[in-house]
Amino acid sequence: MNMYIVTIKLPRNPDHDPKNKITGLCPFSNACSDSTGAHHSFLSSALTEEDARQDADDRGFKHVTRVERIGN
């Protein structure tokens, strides 16, 4: 099993201003405080990069922007 950082993109929030970040309830996760940003990452334990992408799809995230393998 390998660990991957999977980054997804949520639909653009018109209230998002990268120069004036707002913390609060996050649409991605209860463990996140970025309430307006579009890009979020999670850890996926998977055999292959494709499996990690499928993990994102299984969680309902259709727009994967990046998958990075952690470690060897």
Image (tube, rainbow, N blue to C red):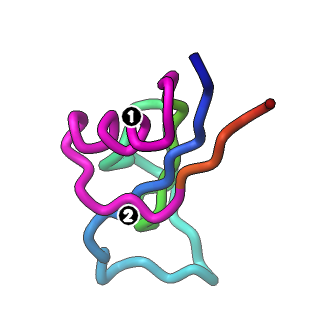
**What range of the chain is rendered magenta?**
45-66
What percent of the width, then of the height, locates residue 23? 52, 55
Q: Is residue 62 left or right of residue 56?
A: left
Indicate yes or no whether the magenta region holds residue 51.
yes
Task: Between residue 33 and residue 52, name the one nearer to us.
Answer: 52
Q: Nearer the viewer, mark 2 or mark 1?
A: 1
Amino acid identity at mark 1: Asp
Circles 2 and 1, Cβ within 8 Å, touching? The answer is: no
Instruction: Please identify the quadrant where the N terminus is shown.
Output: top right
Q: What residue is rendered at 50% in x and 46% in y?
A: 6
What percent of the width, then of the height, locates residue 33? 51, 46
Q: What residue is rendered at 30% in x and 49% in y?
A: 27
Q: What residue is rendered at 24% in x and 35% in y?
A: 59
Q: Secondary structure at mark 2?
A: strand
**Vertical placement of 16 versus 53: above or below?**
below
What percent of the width, then of the height, locates residue 20? 59, 78
Would you name the residue on which mark 1 appears?
Answer: 51
Q: What residue is rendered at 38% in x and 64% in y?
A: 9
Instruction: Please identify the quadrant where the C terminus is shown.
Output: top right
The residue most toward the top is: 1
Amino acid identity at mark 2: Lys
First along the sequence among labels 2 and 1: 2
Q: Residues within 10 Å of mark 1 (few under 14, many from 20)?
A: some
Would you name the residue on which mark 2 appears?
Answer: 9
The Cα–Cα distance between marks 2 and 1, rounded to whole angstroms, is 18 Å
Indicate yes or no whether the magenta region holds residue 41.
no
Q: Residues within 10 Å of mark 2 (few under 14, many from 20)?
A: some
